[in-house]
Image (tube, rainbow, N blue to C red):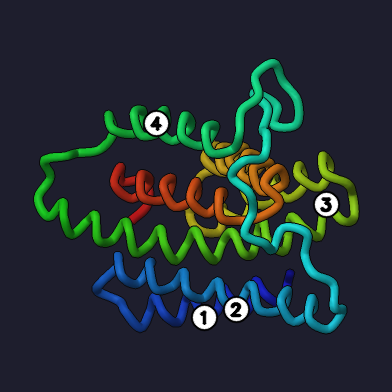
Amino acid sequence: MVIGYMLYHSSGEIIKHGLAGDDAWAIILSRLSLILFVLPFALAAMLTKKKPLYLATGSWGTTIYFPWIFKGPVQDPIWRFMLIFLVVVCSIFSFFIDWGQPHFLVLIGYALSFALINAVLEELLWRGYILSHFVSGFGELKGLGIAGVTFGLYHYHLGFSWPVCLLFSIFGIMMGGVAIRSKGLIPVMVMHFVMNVLFVLSGMIL
């Protein structure tokens, strides 16, 4: 994890400096350096011939429970839980988006580009490899907690405040729970993608 972080961080800084003057695209392309963060985990999995638990497509029909993911009074298939979650989140963020701002279509292009790169690579890293590792070592609940909190703290180096990092930890636990219940990454990649688009459009990122 340390080796991957060092490779990712140093290459991301090189990309940002190389594209100085176009901050938005520098940030977007610097996220491609997450590939270098993923690489040591992928090599380790190949050498040990041990497939990570959640490095799979995943199922949309598996039951997820509300509010505690693994148990709760309300149960739904993941696809319906995801649909309700995204409708609620989009409704909330709609109040924070300046729909009449100039160059809004350009911003949408930034949002889609950033979200596609970031959601796919972060999910491969954090849920595909890191969550799988912690769950294998500590069990589902402890592994989910450790991976989720670590995911939130990791965002501190990206310039987010501690309260926002705490919020990201909560999202990390939620997305980890979706990955565990679905046994894969596609549902949580969709969730992450939409959240990233909303973050960009609302000005939280870029």
Give SS at disc 2: helix
Q: What residue type is labelled 3?
A: Val
Read off the residue under disc 3.
135
Q: Which of marks 4 and 1 is nearer the N terminus?
A: 1
Per the rendering, the mark at residue 36 is 2
Circles 2, 1 touching at the beta carbon (< 8 Å): yes
Read off the residue under disc 4.
87
**Which residue reaches farthest front?**
61
> Which quadrant is the N terminus positioned in?
bottom right
Say left or right for 157 vs 206: right
Q: Which residue is drawn at 36% across and 34% down?
A: 90
Q: Residue at x 38, y 79 (%)?
A: 17
Residue 137 vertical placement versus 62 (above, below): below
Q: Which of marks 2 and 4 is nearer the N terminus?
A: 2
Read off the residue under disc 1.
11
> Which quadrant is the C terminus positioned in?
bottom left
Circles 2, 4 touching at the beta carbon (< 8 Å): no
Mark 3 crowd level (few <14, some 14–19, many ≥20, 10 Å Cα)? many
